Amino acid sequence: MNILIAEDNQIIQMLHAELMSHWGYDFDMASNGIEAIEFAQKNDGKYDFCLMDVEMPKMNGIEATKIIRKIANYFPIMAYSSNHDYKKACFEVGMDDFALKPCPPDELFYKINELSVKLYNLITKPKNFAIKEVMPVDKKHADELRDLAKQGLCKINIRGVGDHDLTVVVHKNVPYKISNDFIGNGDEVSVFLDRSSDRPAECHLYKSSCPMPAIFLRDDEFEEKRKAEDELLKNCVAMVVKKSKP
């Protein structure tokens, strides 16, 4: 996790630095809005989250966010202020959330993970595949992914399965299952449920550039398979990057 922190108070900077280090997050520290803009522009595409103080010298957090939203790819920005009156202005310039100072560490940790949602790009190739997390394209897209995350779901864009890319909505652990099937077990096919509300189906993804068969399910069939998949996926909790030993 890469965090951009914009905060002018040195004591609060130290507290944030200790928290980020404790949580294992990498971070950059800006002391005013101008520095925050410079970090965002220089490291475009790097940050998973930004904690933006509102009242800072040289340039405040609201003005900085307004510029960042124009010059950099999207990443979630949460306002941080002791003055609740700033909340409306923060949302108007494109911030994703607002936290009042002081924010308890457990609440801040929750907010960072809630806001920094991603989707997966999965590219199938002959005898190989690649899967990686990518940022949403904008706040509207991020809000959609956050709604899915609250339901224990995520979204995967699947490329290389025919003339058209496919997008499926799946259990949040399905990306881990796919990596385990293809890399850990060396399987040629990974089976999972597309939980899209308009087309629930059982998908058969092959580790090659070929169409992905999908068997559309009746409501009772889907519910039975959903329960079985929920149980199976309890054991799929991390991405597999190396083949399992025999």
Image (spheres, helix red, strand yellow):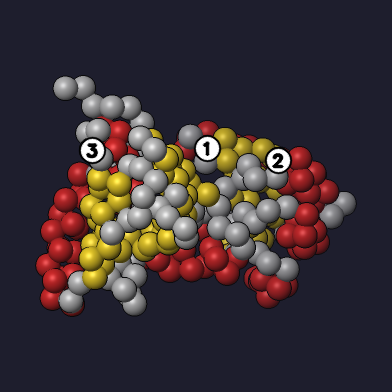
Q: Does the rendering let one see residue 18?
A: no
Q: Which is more N-terminal, label 1 or label 3?
A: 1
Q: Nearer the viewer, residue 76 or 195?
A: 195
Label 2: element kind: loop
Relative to 85, residue 100 above or below:
above
Number of other residues with Cα within 10 Å of mark 2, as a class: few under 14, some 14 to 19, many 20 or more: few
- Based on the displayed image, in which of its 4 quarters is residue 26 positioned? top right
Which residue is under mark 3? 187
Q: Residue 107 location, x and y as percent?
A: 46, 56
Which residue is painted at 80% across and 44% down in the image? Answer: 38
> On the rendered structure, is 228 left or right of 6?
left
Q: Nearer the viewer, residue 182 or 75?
A: 182
The span from disc 2 to disc 3 (Cα, nearest Å) is: 38 Å
Which residue is painted at 27% across and 71% down in the image? Answer: 200
Q: Amino acid at mark 3?
A: Asp
The span from disc 3 to disc 1 (Cα, nearest Å) is: 34 Å
Q: Residue 19 location, x and y as percent?
A: 52, 40
Disc number placed over residue 43 in the picture, else none: 2
Q: Amino acid at mark 2?
A: Asn
- Based on the displayed image, in which of its 4 quarters is residue 181 positioned? top left
Q: Amino acid at mark 1?
A: Tyr
Between label 3 and label 1, give the one nearer the viewer: 3
